[in-house]
Amino acid sequence: MIQHLLHISHVSKHFGGNVAVSDVSFSVDEKQIFGLIGPNGAGKTTLFNCITGFFPATSGEVIFDNKKINALRPDEVCRLGMVRTWQRVKPLGSLTVLENVMIGAFSITGVTREAEAIARENLHSVGLTDYAGKPAGSLPIGLKKKLELARVLATHPKILLLDEICGGLNHTETGIILEIIRGVRQKGATIVFIEHDMKAVTSICDRIVVLNSGEKLAEGTPEEITNNPDVIDAYLGGGHNA
Amino acid sequence: MKQIFLIAILAAIAAALPLFLGENPYIIGIMISVLMMAALSSAWNILGGYAGQYSFGHAAYFGAGAYTTMILITLFNLNPLLCMAGGIVVACMIALITGGIVFRLRGHYFALASIAVAEIVRLSVLNFEFTGGAQGILLSDLSLWGLDLNSKNPFYYGMLLVLVVTLAITAHLRKSKTGFYLQAIREDQDAAASLGINLSFYKNRALLISAALTSVLGSLYGLYIRFIDTSAVLDLRLSIEIILTAIIGGVGTLWGPVVGALLLVPLAEVLRSNLLGDALVKAGLVSETSGMGLFLKENLAHAHVLVYGIITVLCILYLPKGILGLFRRVK
């Protein structure tokens, strides 16, 4: 049997009678960049929430690093090495940019000096060094996205779940973020990311899963996905210029 | 480190003050009140200011310290330090029960539950027999274990010591993992959890530190006044005054609670003793026998909570970060 780093098996999430995610399965291998795409309301963020412990899946299993993590809290999931970013960025507004990243670093060290060193390193890698002393709440959106990325990188994760990390960014900014993501993979991390920008997804992903109305519609390489008639019909065909 | 030096220097100045002021019990009494409120508000600030969990029931921990100490002394004549330790245990138990249940929930449940728990404690104490019920507990001995209860100086230094310890803990926390985690929880609980922070563990930790310090102050207060009842040590009004002191001085700052106490406690004293009314009369602005003079004399003394309220509203409107926030903005 092949060992997958992250294995989602028949995961469903119901909110009352509302089915947000229905029987979704896929596996992510180590060092993969894995794309999760689908129209609005397809259940991508809900699936992220189930995987990272924010709400437990109604049924199904989430297996990470050979460990069932369904019943774990978000902080436990993070300490196992899986960390997520937020579609609507969540800066710790009155703390400085540096302190925000230090919070991430504290999950791997208890020493303030070390946390600061790790934080500075990660601020440098996303190009936020000049903003270290600014309150995080005062940054423009593009820099807040970078801050989200630096903060999760400081936890030294095995796998990153990025929820529309390029959302709201222009082409240049998106390019910079994608470059950072490639660098992170180079260092050995695995990435799952939700994205709307098809150009970004197809240029960077090794493998893609398409969700539609909570169900898995297709899975494959970027070429397979862009040529899949179901996907074109349900998603790309809907006026989206791929 | 800088802050620790500042704490040490100010503590040394505060420690020397009684030597210069002589044995004026009135002045010493007010200074004890300032130190106590500064320490209470600082202890509250660890939980409310840094972790963002507003407790409206800190009187419960203050009362736990005061009652446990007084009961242990009157019944068993235990060493006061042991009694304080007993008070810490009781306060921490109340804190653990409250936090253990409520901190699993998000939102404002803790604020509501803290009021409920404090009221449960107050009503229980009021109705139990071993707590003296509505009569309270009077300590008739004037000396305990070599401690002269007639002298105010030991309590001045006792309160000062607790204040210094509280500020030192706060200063240390701010630069440590726990302190950063508490602030992350205050700013955004989802983000905090996603970055590996066990929310209820750290909230409970802040609550326990805060409750233990508050309880020690209650113990000192009981021995200092030698009489306690529920309206003195378990009242909701005390909880509110603790919060207002922090808000007016500056929530979530090291020195805010101290500034708040330095301002509000003397102000309350001025109003309570009607110094303001007397001053207006002396200045010839108001005649003592006129309607206005009589009104001031009758009412101003009871108005200190009202004045707190007005100051709080003004603070929220114009100085949302408290008096210390003003200085930071100027910088």
Image: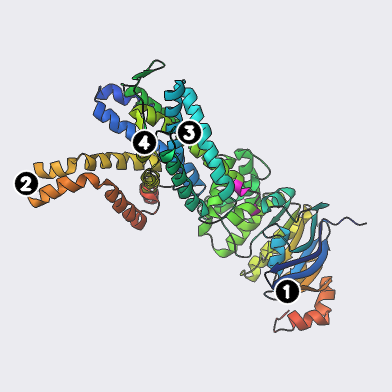
Task: Tell me where the magenta segment starts and ends, as one range.
Answer: B194-200
Reading the image, the residue beneath label 3 is: B168
Indicate which label's residue lies in the foreground, 4 or 1. 4
**Tag 3's secondary structure?**
helix
- Looking at this rendering, what residue extends furthest in the front direction? B129
Q: Are marks 2 and 4 on the same chain?
A: yes
Residue B149 % position (x, y) = 34, 21
Image quarter of the C terminus of chain A: bottom right
Gap between marks 4 and 1 measured at Cα: 65 Å
Above or below: residue B21 compared with residue A41: above
Reading the image, the residue beneath label 1 is: A38
- Looking at this rendering, what residue extends furthest in the right direction? A1
Using residue B244 as the reference point, say whether residue A204 is left or right of it.
Answer: right
Reading the image, the residue beneath label 2 is: B289
Q: First in sequence: mark 3 or mark 4? A: 3
Using residue A4 as the reference point, say whether residue A50 is left or right of it.
Answer: left
Q: Are marks 4 and 1 in contact (CB under 8 Å)?
A: no
